[in-house]
Image (cartoon, rainbow, N blue to C red):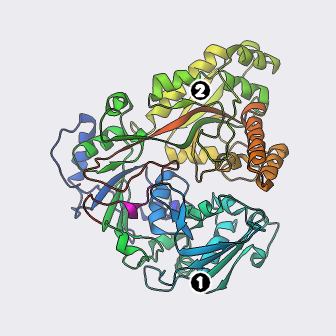
Amino acid sequence: MTAVRHALGDRPGALGLWRPVPRHRGAPGVVLGAALGWLTLTACGPALPPADLTIINGAEPESLDPALALSIEDLRVTQPLFEGLTRNDPVTAGPIPGLAERWDISADGRTYRFYLRSNAVWSTGEPLTAADVAWSWRRVLDPRTGAGYASQLFCVENAEAYHTGRLADPEQLGFRATAPLVFEVRLRRPTPYFLDLCAFPTLAVVPRRVIEQYGDQWIRARPLPVSGPYQLEFWRLNDRVRLRKNPRYWDAARTALAVVDLLTIANPTTAFNLYETGRADVIWDRNLVPAELLDLLRRRPDCHRFDFLATYFVRFNTTRPPLDDPRVRRALSLAIDRRRIVERITRGGEQPAAGLVPPGTAHHQPVEAVGYDPEGARRLLAEAGYPGGRGLRPLRYLYWTAGAGTGQEHARIAVELRAMWEQVLGARVELDNREKRVFITAQRQLDYDLSQSSWVGDYNDPNTFLDLFLSGNGNNRTGWADPEYDALLERANAEPDRARRAALLAAAERRLVGEAAVVAPVYFSSGFHFFRPAQVAGIYPNLLDVHPLNALRRPGTR
């Protein structure tokens, strides 16, 4: 999708792409000076009729293809366009019926039979069938697709073998359409969070006919068949994605908002001024609020704090000396004063992290795998042959910002980490700041020594964090492959007893964070939304920070 967008350049096309930013609906208020330049540019663009709701979504989406979407900005747009067998409950974020109105589960927990809704159709009117589901899932597993979340389906029989090329015949995959509206899945083992996976955007149903006709440019098709509650009206670069209600969606009667805009804004000052002046209704993310104002803003009634499953951590590139030595990695982790970071920089109620899996995660046994231990850090570095940092080459710390906007907290944390590593270990650390898209590419290509990282749980189970670092996971991005770790997770996922499973998962987490020190956890995140309840309803705090757009409404409407 990135290539398609670059090819379009500044010309309006099938996606309605324009560089000038159109005027937002106005409201009285005072705008901070840093935002004035951006707001001035809006006067040059074509006027748009106002949306029913305007949400500040953050950075520019990378892709609207559910199989390729990776970032939270991508997923928030793809989720209302393309639905899966299940969807997320707006209150709990747990799985509820989506395109499937019901399902049966076998006594051994391995076979699921989904019954699709008879009134589920594409937005263009064609029937939506179980064969569409099967084709969409095969596409995710096809290695030529390049789906970053293909591993979400590895719990299905033969799925991993097919994705890795050890199995060539897609007919041997453990899912199939047994009737036009019946879809059957056979799992390798019981998977307690399988219905949660079915709600994740990667497993959504996408239009085969259009994808086969247009290839990589299928998202430009007009009309674009969608399976979710909203249709794509346009995507304007550096401006917004506009979504319009899909009248053929099976639950359209309970989709309250006709038009929703998701704004592409990276600058926290600009974002907050648009919200303050009524030009935007919702800010999803805390990093889109000026950090220096957070202590004050947290006291306001329109600031809604909540706990969710998210961890901020440092990745180590384990393929490069000296970071191929776990003693060096562990020394760097032990040199981090996590409490100093949450008290001096983030200041939003975050908790220092001693493990990777956040507290409150279902079926989780908390671990204390790492802490602040300067003496222990120096001892380990000396054992590795670098006493006082002597002989240790400069290390490059990769992080991202978007100009003077989103990601500035990453920059402050980077400076603080560099100071800790230099003061405690004598290590020299060079800071490497990239724009977000370049940062992601560099991380995927292992073009770093140390890298700023974070992860938000895709479902409520420790696996959503621990599976990342399996040898074949596309989101690993550390170069680490450890048969012992893989075996621990394999045993845990095959263990029916919850207590024993939790103990095995805890052992895997201690190996990942403590013994091998592949990552250095920093803190467990704290979530913030900004919206005025008198103006917006349907947003509920939940552990996955998932808020379906079709559940949002203006108070007083149904």
Q: Secondary structure at mark 1?
A: loop
535 versus 339 height, above or below: below
Specify whether 196 is left or right of 318: left
Q: Which residue, given by chain and number where applicable, does mark 1 sit on?
A: 181
Residue 247: % across, % down:
36, 77
Q: Which residue is at 73% across, 29% downward?
A: 329
150 and 94: which one is in front?
A: 94
* Alpha-carbon span between mark 1 and mark 2: 57 Å
Callout 1 amino acid: Leu
**Do residues under tags 1 and 2 come within 8 Å of each other at their CB atoms?**
no
311 versus 131 height, above or below: above
Q: Which residue, given by chain and number where applicable, does mark 2 sit on?
A: 430
Look at the image and tell me whether residue 426 can be seen. Answer: no
Q: Is-magenta flag for residue 196?
A: no
Q: Which residue is at 46% across, 77% downward?
A: 225
Q: Residues within 10 Å of mark 2 (few under 14, many from 20)?
A: some
132 and 191: which one is in front?
A: 191
* Image quadrant where one finds the C terminus: bottom left
- Mark 1 or mark 2, which has the lower sequence index? 1
Q: Residues within 10 Å of mark 1 (few under 14, many from 20)?
A: many
Magenta region, residue range: 547-552
